[in-house]
Image (cartoon, rainbow, N blue to C red):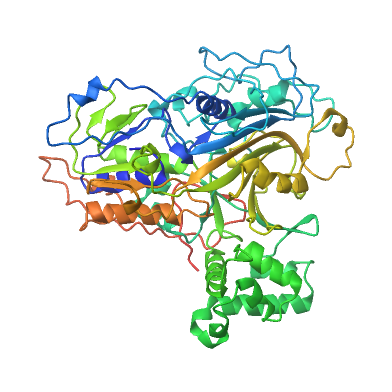
Amino acid sequence: MNTCLPESIIAAACSRSVQRVLHVDSRSYYGGNWASFSFSGLLSWLKEYQENNDIVIDSSLWQEQILENEEAIALIRKDKTIQHVEVFCYASQDLHEYVEEAGALQKNHASVTPVNSSEAADSACLPTEDEPLSTENCEMPEEQTPSSDPESALEVNDAEETGEKENHSDCKTSEEKTNENVPTAEDTAEQPKKNRITYSQIVKEGRRFNIDLVSKLLYSQGMLIDLLIKSNVSQYAEFKIISRILAFREGRVEQVPCSRADVFNSKQLTMVEKRMLMKFLTFCMEYEEHPDEYKAYEDITFSEYLKTQKLTPNLQYFVLHSIAMTSETTSNTIDGLKATKNFLHCLGRYGNTPFLFPLYGQGELPQCFCRICAVFGGIYCLHHSVQCKAIIDQFGQRIISKHFLVEDSYFSENTCSRVQYRQISRAVLITDRSVLKSDSDQQISILIVPAEEPGSSAVRVIELCSSTMTRMKGTYLVHLTCTSSKTAREDLEAVVEKLFIPHTETGIENEEVEKPRILWALYFNMRDSSNISRNSNNDLPSNVYVCSGPDGGLGNDNAVKQAETIFQNICPNEDFCPPPPNPEDIVLDGDSSQPESSEPSAILEANSETPAGSTTQGNLEESSE
């Protein structure tokens, strides 16, 4: 139950192992907290959480289905994984203009609450029940957005690097593709001054946005990439290479050299520093073969270890925060060396950085695995909830199943009373320019801002350009993520103020401002239930398997490990997500003239080089190295 990434991977693996799969989700869209939304879809999602009250279920529908020797385990329908939601609109807007998304289907729209344009920022605080989550009593401008249609939510369309397609809807539905003949705001709106983007334009161009609830990247040698290649699920998705890795030092943003060519072409490093860095990175690639070099430092932090390696402060900063991307206070020497080796191991497979980003957002990945499951006989029911023990649905229908997978967000407080959850602080910003100007406006960047106060966490910033098919032209989509210590706004606002400024009418006149302007901002906290033992939940039957939501890490390895572990418990002697058979080798019943079915290897030959920033379409390709 739930179509998040781990559940979708398990569903695909079970379907490929000739298991009968029923995949149910109480939401009306795929992906759960891994989903991606258009701008109007995101506002609908926010409104849904604002109105997310406890739903009273008629118990008579399912209680009569419980047998004498059975005990019901009730599941909740209210999602409590999102908290402390705050929305701020800094872009100006015409209060008298009826704003509608370009190419939107004619459906009943929600009423629009005008925003007072005289204020510098209009905030909408969406508190969760029984918790004092907002600091002010304010109102969110509701949008007139069409509701999401999940029936064909698995279509993945080819993408152009120009970013001018308008065929992606709230949950990637093919029915809601934008009419190409409809003029867009970029073609018709008059922009007398540079960078003057209004809230009305953002809403009109809302289908160009695909905003992730969870911000992650794919390591090019990571477990998820290997699984996509092995299972041939990569044919349903396309990817962009992260083009640059940035660092924030002394109040300014600068690019970090990663590959050998970048190091020697860098003007930030002296020749001595270049030799020192290459020598240290070479050691990290084979550090396990030289235990004498690090054994004496295993009990100290990686930050302290770097100081013993005669690296300059400049190099120590780059290695710690932009290559290893580890904590300055909690990561030990072994953790830092492993992270550095993993970073270097992933370089060069598809480009000059180790990371890939899926076109149309992270929400594409669960849908790709759901498609494989459906192709091999899986049945999908969205907006369909289960009331108890995985056998009775909301209509009182009893469903027989050997195994039941459920995300822990469906458990009631009685079931998870002993569980202590962590939280992730998230922010989504729409800005008018990049945090670091360059010759190209198609840069995808990752930046780690170190923690400044004790007890706080480093903040991960991912900036997306239009070629990722996640935002409208003339804007940038920025994701900020860190481990929570307070509310999302309290955790992230200091970093936002360092990198950005609010978009105001008076500020537009000053073209010398170097910081990007914020047009729109969203803050929220998301539950992190990773690494919680199944035994922490109370009285679960042995055939009920628990999946966690997204974790706060950069990669997706935790979701893949979780899915493989559960699959091996369900199908211990089966291959995990084997490649599908070649259509030419499939033998139909009664057709004896065809050769026997065989499954080809999923490893594909690859181009020796992929230009940085290019799109990896369809099948992910192996490096020839």
Q: Quadrant of the N terminus?
A: top left
Q: Residue at 36%, 47% (x, y): give it.
A: 547
Relative horizontal placement of residue 539, taking residue 609 as reference (left or right)? left
x then y, percent, for residue 6: 38, 47
Nearer to the camera, 514 or 488: 488
Relative horizontal placement of residue 580, taking residue 353 as reference (left or right)? left
Nearer to the camera, 616 or 233: 233
Query: Can I make out residue 599 in this image?
Result: no
Relative horizontal placement of residue 539, taking residue 151 as reference (left or right)? left
Query: Can I make out residue 107 in this image?
Result: yes
Which quadrant of the figure has residue 256?
A: bottom right
Q: Is residue 244 above or below residue 170?
A: below
x then y, percent, for residue 563: 35, 52
Nearer to the camera, 532 or 587: 532
Please state the total of marks drawn on the protein image: 0
x then y, percent, for residue 81: 48, 39
Q: Residue at 45%, 27% (x, y): give it.
A: 174
Q: Residue at 53%, 80% (x, y): give it.
A: 287
Looking at this rendering, what residue extends furthest in the bottom direction? 292
x then y, percent, for residue 621: 46, 56
Q: Is residue 44 above or below residue 405?
A: above
